[in-house]
Amino acid sequence: MKKVSVIFASTLFVISCSSNTQSDKTETKFLDLSAAEHSELADEYWTISKHIPPQYPASAARNDVSGCVKVAVGIGSDGRAKGYEVRSSYPKGVFDDYAVAALQKWRWEATERNSGRIPILKTVQLNFAMKEAPDDHEYIENCSSKR
């Protein structure tokens, strides 16, 4: 009797797992607006409705390290982050995980122009600075909005 119960439970488990696999394989097609020249156009599709600032790494704060991370983030039709790629960071790797963790919590709302809720790929730069206007030459060179 125990053998039958175990086989029955195992069969149900396999069936339930296989029925979920199909819905997980749908691939989102993003309109790529991640290039710098498309940043204003990207804002015409989605606006930020929930902005969570990233945590500042304790080691960077102790050492008064400032930096930035540029991330290409996919905004899905539900207004949530659907994947990312770190495009650049300064200093390399110090703030990356903190920037991505914050972006995963952000939410966007479709604009009137984007009534079809078209998913897009957009570049976002998150700055990390202990001072409002860091005077570190390398920070300015790597994180200025004019580069």
Image: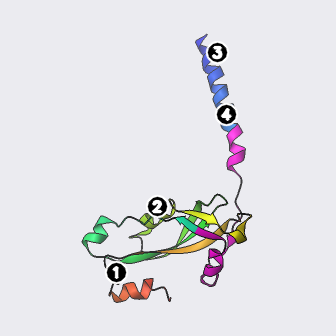
Q: Is residue 134 left or right of residue 73?
A: left
Counting from the top left corner in percent of width and height, residue 62 is at: 25, 70
Kind of residue at badge 4: Ser
Residue mark closest to the camera, 4 vs 1: 1
- The structure residue drawn at horizontal position 66% and vertical position 69%, both measured from the top left corner, is 111
Residue mark closest to the camera, 1 vs 2: 1
- The structure residue drawn at horizontal position 66% and vertical position 32%, both measured from the top left corner, is 14
Q: Earlier in the sequence, mark 3 or mark 1?
A: 3
Q: Are marks 3 and 4 in contact (CB under 8 Å)?
A: no
Q: Secondary structure at mark 3?
A: helix
Q: Examine the rendered structure and indicate whether residue 91 appears above or below residue 75.
A: below
Q: Earlier in the sequence, mark 3 or mark 2?
A: 3
Residue 4 numbered tag: 3
Q: Examine the rendered structure and indicate whether residue 145 appears above or below residue 23.
A: below
Residue 16 numbered tag: 4
Judged from this view, the residue extending furthest toward the front is: 112
Give yes or no for residue 23 being in the magenta stretch.
Answer: yes
Kind of residue at badge 3: Val
The Cα atoms of the two marked residues, 3 and 4, are separated by 18 Å
Q: Are marks 1 and 2 in contact (CB under 8 Å)?
A: no
Q: Secondary structure at mark 1?
A: loop
The magenta stretch is 19-47
Circle 2 is placed at which residue position? 101
Q: Is residue 54 left or right of residue 41?
A: left
